[in-house]
Image: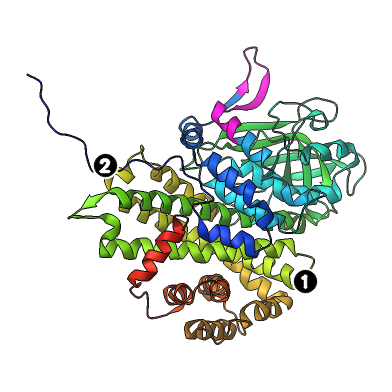
Amino acid sequence: MVWTTHTVFNQPKPLGNSNLFLSDMPLREAIQREQAGWDADVLASLGQQLGTQESLELGRLANANPPELLRYDATGQRLDDVRFHPAWHILMQGLIANRVHNLPWQEDARIGAFVARAARFVLHAQVEAGTLCPVTMTFGAIPLLQRSLPLEFQSWLPPLFSDRYDAHLSPGGQKRGLLIGMGMTEKQGGSDVLSNTTTATPLTARGSGEAYRLVGHKWFFSVPQSDAHMVLAQTEGGLSCFFLPRILPDGTRNAIRLERLKDKLGNRSNASSEVEFQDATAWLLGEEGDGVRQILKMGSLTRFDCALGSHGLMRRALSVALYHTLQRQAFGKTLIEQPMMRQVLGRMALRLEGQTAALMRLARAYDGAGDPLEQALCRVLTPAAKFEVCRQGIPFVGEAMEVLGGLGYCEESELPRLYREMPVNSIWEGSGNIMCLDVMRTWGRLPAVQEALERELGEVKGQNRHFDHQWRRLSQLMRKPQEEQGRAVTSMLFNLFAAAQLLRYSSPPLAEAWCQMTLDARGERILPDRLCDMLFARAMGG
């Protein structure tokens, strides 16, 4: 007898073969108004390629097969290498070919290049997040290296600006493409880099561009396979920034010893390591004692990428949840027709509307960094964006998981991987409290911040009472700032910035709903059905 116990039905198909860009109306609108409309065709092509089932499978494979540390070869010779699954290299090729690591730094870069690059970053994040780590550090390092790369390494500049991915272990000047990593954190200090104990002593002369000998360790040494790292070490003049190549100019390996790879909650595809420097050779960038200022220039860009990455993960989680609810039946209706589910999904879509508008406007501020007020916006809003977007990401993906129910909790779904990825962006480049301290101190020490915010937010005063009330409250808090209020201040600042963009450019019901959701102290209100329909349509491409 043949037993038929059940027939599978009412099980939604997984989301594959969609265009990640064309299906995102808020992003499409944002790149147009923030002066990157010239990149729309490239973004549409990229969105189509990244949304295929094949690309999504590469993301899964890269995380299911994490990198391996190769400390020695068969003869006992020290290697200190990392081996990756082929999926990692294919994903990296795509990122580099699309210039996510260097687009705004090109000589012929157009106005809006930061915005275009930010949009490309968000699209890639929806497929695989670990590969973004080497890309964002290289992106942050390039402007610093343009100004202060030692003479011995001038041949590195052309491959830094190329669109070729080159994973071979060779001297940098001989490669078609280069990647740069970072090494700041030590066991005893964490975010308190001034407590670093790694020491640097000059080989011959002291000063900018000179070679030093490094002895010490790094507790988190990101992307150890990079061609060089920017590291901090103590000199007679104080904490300083160094350029530490993996292969020295004479072709020999630098004395960088990989002790182990970190066993992380998420970000499994990407290698993070612990290292020791046993008389490693590095070159001083800038002057002795200027290390924190040098690294902060790089850190602002990488912090912004943390927010972009979390936003991309959130966007993918919403797409998966919406696609599921359009198909799944419960109690005689599709899930997306159920009143409570509509509220959950509507608020998720509304959250991304505000984030998209704010992040793309902030990207344009980086494009206009020659303007002191735009520079001030970048300085204060980058840590605010990192804090608020990354903080929202963890419960956001958890909510998407709950939309799918048990299916969303199983590894066959994308959502467990997205959920595990979320915390790293909150922690890397400074955890939440560090971001809030940075916002408070920047606002207090940089007079242009108040003027920049007055210009940005003042244009929409009078359009929404929740906005006006919270802007007055925030201004009052910052007249006599108290550190204990840092998290509330930082969250309020980002939500006001996002509200200003929506009040300026979005439909009044959408902007009003954002202000009620994020700025009304009385809490969230019910979203009207018509607004939910509009949010769902926009989240699926209109």
Residue 157 on the magenta segment? no
**Label 2 to label 1: alpha-carbon separation:** 54 Å
Q: What stretch is highlighted in magenta?
A: 71-91
Q: Quick check: 393 left or right of 205?
A: left
Frontmost residue, 303 versus 80: 303
Which amino acid lies under the numbered mark 1 shown in the image of this protein?
Answer: Pro
Q: In which quarter of the image is residue 178?
A: top right
Q: In which quarter of the image is residue 529?
A: bottom left
Rendered location of residue 10, percent (x, y):
23, 43
Task: Say which element carries label 2.
Answer: loop
| Residue at the spot 46% in from the left edge and 58% down from the top edge | 542
Q: Quick check: 209 left or right of 375?
A: right
Q: Quick check: 64 left or right of 38?
A: left
Which amino acid lies under the numbered mark 2 shown in the image of this protein?
Answer: Gln
Q: Identify the disc placed on residue 452.
A: none
Crowd around label 1: few <14 · some 14–19 · many ≥20 (10 Å)? few
Q: Can residue 434 be seen in this view?
A: no
Rendered location of residue 447, percent (x, y):
73, 78
Task: Say which element carries label 1.
Answer: helix
| Mark 1 lies on residue | 372
**Disc on the earlier residue, 2 or 1:** 2
Rendered location of residue 449, percent (x, y):
69, 75
- Which image quarter is the N terminus in? top left
Q: Identify the disc placed on residue 11.
A: 2
How many marks overall?
Answer: 2
| Residue at the spot 56% in from the left edge and 38% down from the top edge | 270
Q: Please say if 25 is above or below 77.
A: below
| Residue at the spot 89% in from the left edge and 43% down from the top edge | 210
- Identity of the residue furthest to the left in this view: 1
Rendered location of residue 180, percent (x, y):
71, 41
Q: Please say if 443 is above or below 240.
A: below
Frontmost residue, 127 versus 1: 1
